Amino acid sequence: MLTEERTFVAIKPDGVQRGLIGDIITRFERKGFKILAMKLLNVSDKQAAEHYAEHEGKPFYPRLVKYIQSGPIVAMVIKGYNAVESVRHIVGATSPLKADVGTIRADFAQVMEYNVIHASDCVESAEREISIYFDEKEIFDTWKTKTEELIEEDELL
């Protein structure tokens, strides 16, 4: 069953610094996803702590925070049918070595620690992560993509 969802995606500092923003966004748009919000920002201490709260106290936590704050990120809210699962499929496994050929991480990342992109792992995490980086007034969902129009017209779905 098709479920329309929002998800959170962040192009991490290494992806921004390597000039991969356009290539990455293109993959989501070509799949038919709609970008509802997007911004370039430096992650604050508060945002980093909230984003990685579930990892606090773990040995790798300081490295995560240092990495996400090492340069600007591109934060995005993406909407589409089964967006969380579909976006994660496009992104690929956390480890680029285990990511399927053709995924963002397989194509653009070499090591797990610098894997170019983050995508929410479930709808609840997506909504939590969206709220860390965006106010609802910054999210624009007042227009439809051609994909949305076609799916809504299809009486079988």
Image (cartoon, grey):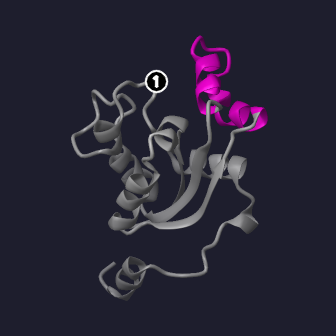
Task: Say what amino acid the circle numbered 1 marks.
Answer: Glu
The residue shown at (75%, 68%) is 137
Q: Count every numbered label the image shows and give the total.
A: 1
Of the pair 21 and 96, the residue shown nearer to us: 21
For the view shown, which residue lies furthest in the right direction?
46
The C terminus: image quadrant: bottom left
82 on left or right of 10 = left
Q: Is residue 5 visible?
A: no
Of the pair 35 and 74, the residue shown nearer to us: 74
Q: Callout 1: few (<14), some (14-19), or many (20+) C-alpha neighbours within 10 Å?
A: some
Q: Position of residue 100 (x, y in %)?
A: 24, 39
Q: Position of residue 38 (x, y in %)?
A: 60, 59
13 on left or right of 131 = left
Q: Is residue 88 magenta?
A: no
For the view shown, which residue lies furthest in the left direction?
101
Q: Secondary structure at mark 1?
A: loop
The residue shown at (45%, 28%) is 114
Q: Position of residue 37 (x, y in %)?
A: 61, 63
Is 36 situated above or below 98? below
Is 150 situated above or below 53? below
Q: Mark 1 highlights which residue?
A: 113
14 on left or right of 52 = left
Q: Quadrant location of residue 30? A: bottom left
Q: Position of residue 155 (x, y in %)?
A: 33, 87
The N terminus: image quadrant: bottom left
Residue range corresponding to the magenta coloring:
45-68
Q: Is residue 7 visible?
A: yes
Of the pair 60 and 57, the residue shown nearer to us: 60
Q: Quadrant location of residue 141? A: bottom right
Is 31 situated above or below 142? above
Magenta segment main secondary structure: helix
